[in-house]
Amino acid sequence: MSAPRKLPGRAAGAEQALGADVGASIFIDTSALYAIYNPRDRDHAAARSFLLDLRKQRVRLLTSSLVLVESYILVHARTGREGLLRFRRAIAGSAWLKTVPVTTADEESAWTLLESRRDKEYSFVDAASFVVMRALELGEAFAFDDHFAQEGFEVVPAVRPRR
């Protein structure tokens, strides 16, 4: 196992929270988290199948604290309070998901990115995700929209993106 990597612009200890090897990791977005959770989501089967493949390959899924908040809001809006609490318990108990805190510096970088990409329609949470992914040197995003591809990341699984 390699030594922990220093994450640019991140508080000391962030590397240890992620573990030493962040090379076999993929970022997971709200669209994929929700698709995994909700059997009525149009991408549920693809998301569950892909998640099982990743787990067999021991690929770690990373997300940001902002993506989790966005996911909580989406689940609550679509499934109600009890659905939100079930989702939270499932996420909190998962061994397959690690959460990276979004720092104040990450937020500022996300605002700068949004200002510089006025032709794009992605959200602040997406921009913060891009900042975190670059800091962690992640090239792939498990997502079902094209925002990550617009920013140069590979979107997996290779399915039709949502608009």
Image (cartoon, rainbow, N blue to C red):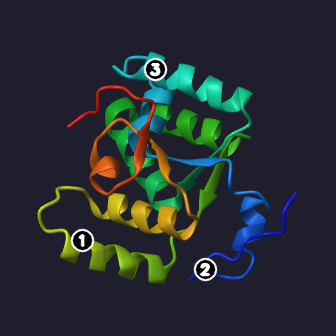
The residue depicted at 72 percent of the width and 82 percent of the height is: 12
The residue depicted at 70 percent of the width and 77 percent of the height is: 6
Coordinates of residue 60 in the picture (x, y in percent): 67, 45
* Residue type pointed to by label 3: Ala
The residue depicted at 64 percent of the width and 31 percent of the height is: 54
Q: Secondary structure at mark 1?
A: helix
Quadrant in the rendering for residue 118: bottom left
Answer with left or right where residue 54 lies relative to residue 2. left
Whether residue 61 is situated above or below residue 110 in the rendered picture: above
* Residue type pointed to by label 1: Leu
Q: Nearer the viewer, residue 148 or 152?
A: 152
Query: Crowdedness of circle 2 by 10 Å Cα count: few (<14), some, many (20+)?
Result: some
Coordinates of residue 101 in the picture (x, y in percent): 57, 67
Sooner in the amino-acid sequence: mark 2 or mark 3: 2
Answer with left or right where residue 149 lies relative to residue 56. left
Query: Crowdedness of circle 3 by 10 Å Cα count: few (<14), some, many (20+)?
Result: some
Q: Considering the image in quadrants, where does the N terminus appear?
A: bottom right
What distance separates the C-alpha of mark 3 from that of mark 1? 30 Å
Whether residue 150 is situated above or below residue 49 in the rendered picture: below
Coordinates of residue 120 in the picture (x, y in percent): 17, 59
Q: Considering the image in quadrants, where does the C terminus appear?
A: top left
Please give the residue where the numbered disc 2 appears in the rendered image: 10
Please give the residue where the numbered disc 3 appears in the rendered image: 46
Q: Secondary structure at mark 2?
A: loop
Q: Nearer the viewer, residue 138 or 80?
A: 138
Quadrant in the rendering for residue 129: bottom left
Label 2–label 3 contact, CB within 8 A: no
Please give the residue where the numbered disc 1 appears in the rendered image: 114
Q: Secondary structure at mark 3?
A: helix
Coordinates of residue 32 in the picture (x, y in percent): 44, 36
